[in-house]
Amino acid sequence: MIDSDGYIKLTDFGLAKENITNSNKANSFCGTPEYLAPEILEKVPYGKEVDWWGLGVIVYEMLTWMPPFFNQNKIKLFDSISNLKVNYPHFLSPEASKFLRELLVKENRLGHDSIDRIKSHEFFYGIKWEAIYEKKIRPPFVPNLRWDADTKYIDAEFLLEMVSDSYQKGDTIESKDDMFEGFSFNNKISNSSNGIIVDCKLYEKKDFKSDCEY
């Protein structure tokens, strides 16, 4: 998504976890299937490097119109992600190909030690990150909005869809395992015996007592 100024707007952090470090890794099996990193599928503890795999997937998709691995059969999709090598089309620029090859790998993934290695990669040659952060560069496309909530750029197909899976206060999640241990929408975090989900500002359980509404 982009905002009214034409700048990218990051959205959908519904399954985001905070405070992930080399000594405090995650192990939840969750995410969009096509974007899952191999280590998530292998059910080993993982860190922020899975996000750099996801970055590689979305850049690949933006440049080729398809993710590196795709199959409607999820078992076959996961097997491909875990065991097959990525195919890089010949029309990719040398810089793009090199960037993707360093992201879509199992070991020593670009960015595993520092985000600066990603920002300084030749794929981003000429990019002035601070100027972008401060919105000093005019984007190539700026939406012509009639009002702040104008939806004219959103396809009617999505505007007419019924919202059927949104969380509502009082909903419960039936879970018999610890797959989502530590996430805010987890029955076990509630102090109530009936498993009512709480509205939380923070994800870490240690903060729930002071930052949740019951």
Image (tube, rainbow, N blue to C red):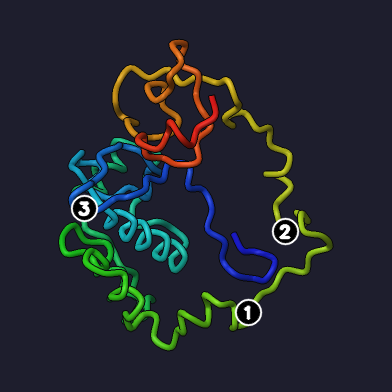
Query: Relative to 200, is 73 on the left or the right?
Result: left
Q: Nearer the viewer, residue 63 or 26?
A: 26
- The residue sitting at 34% across, 56% down in the picture is 51
Q: Where is residue 136 in the image (x, y as percent from the top left)?
A: 59, 83
* Dot 3 amino acid type: Leu
Would you say the residues marked 1 and 3 are in contact, meaning their CB atoms lie under 8 Å apart?
no
**Residue 135 position (above or below residue 3):** below
Label 2 secondary element: loop
- The residue sitting at 70% across, 53% down in the picture is 154
Q: How many labels does the image show?
A: 3
- The residue sitting at 33% across, 17% down in the picture is 176
Mark 1 → mark 2, Cα distance in angstroms:
16 Å
Label drawn at residue 140: 1
**Residue 67 position (above or below residue 160):** below
Mark 2 → mark 3, Cα distance in angstroms:
37 Å
Label drawn at residue 84: 3
